[in-house]
Image: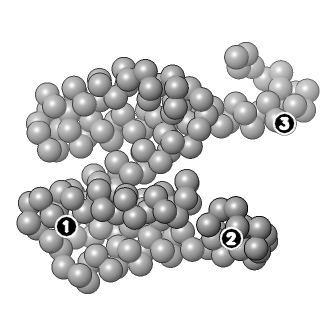
Amino acid sequence: MNISARPAVSGDIPEILRLYRLLSAEMAALGAVFVVMLLGRRLAGDRAGRWSGLVLITSPHFVYQHCGRTGEMDSTLILLWCTSVFFVLKSEEDRRWLWAAGVCLGLVGITKHVVYMVPAALVAALPLLAARRWPGWKWVLCTLGIATVVAAPWYAIQLARYGAVFVDQYL
């Protein structure tokens, strides 16, 4: 791939969009590696954090086939999903981190599909359930409410714009 100013000068907009899509997927993949390292470090120490990042960045499926190099949204999905888990773990220190987790879960619903919000929320809640540090229903409902507030406008716009076609093909 030739990364130069030529597409911008010639007005080849689809080439610019393709480049943007690839770069955003690659940046999200690198962000996911960083967040996985933070998760490993938080859960099992520095060495585990380094190993978890190394394993993810050297996984051929992650790098070449499905996330980083293909321009798919899966690297963004993994980044947001892992970030929501990290924020849930941080909420053991301060419950307000659950609000950030709610924002990430809402963005998960926009990134791929609303159905992905359910397993993402369950995976994000696992560390608290395993440690028996349930924050209480008030915090859980607030987190889910924030996720809904983040995701709902996109779905409302698509429904208003496409109507039954959106419901039939997407939902």
Q: Residue at x 22, y 70 (%)?
A: 95
Q: Secondary structure at mark 1?
A: loop
What amino acid is labelled 3 in the image?
A: Ile
Instruction: Give the mark, 2 or 1, whose residue is nearer the N terminus.
Output: 1
Q: Is residue 169 visible?
A: yes
What amino acid is labelled 1 in the image?
A: Asp
* Residue 64 screen position, x and y as percent: 51, 22
Question: How far, Cα to Cα, is label 1 from label 3?
Answer: 45 Å
Instruction: Give the mark, 1 or 3, whose residue is nearer the N terminus.
Output: 3
Q: Which residue is mark 1?
A: 94
85 left or right of 8 in image: left
Q: Residue at x 29, y 56 (%)?
A: 123
Q: How is the image coloured?
A: one colour
Q: Residue at x 50, y 76 (%)?
A: 149
Q: Vertical placement of 150 versus 19: above or below?
A: below
* Residue 62 screen position, x and y as percent: 44, 29
Please tell me the numbered disc located at residue 13: 3
Please tell me the numbered disc located at residue 74: none
Q: Vertical placement of 125 versus 64: above or below?
A: below
Q: How crowded is the residue under tag 1: few (<14 C-alpha within 10 Å), some, or many (20+)? A: few
What amino acid is labelled 2 in the image?
A: Val
Q: Which residue is mark 2?
A: 167
- The nearer-to-camera label among 3 and 2 is 2
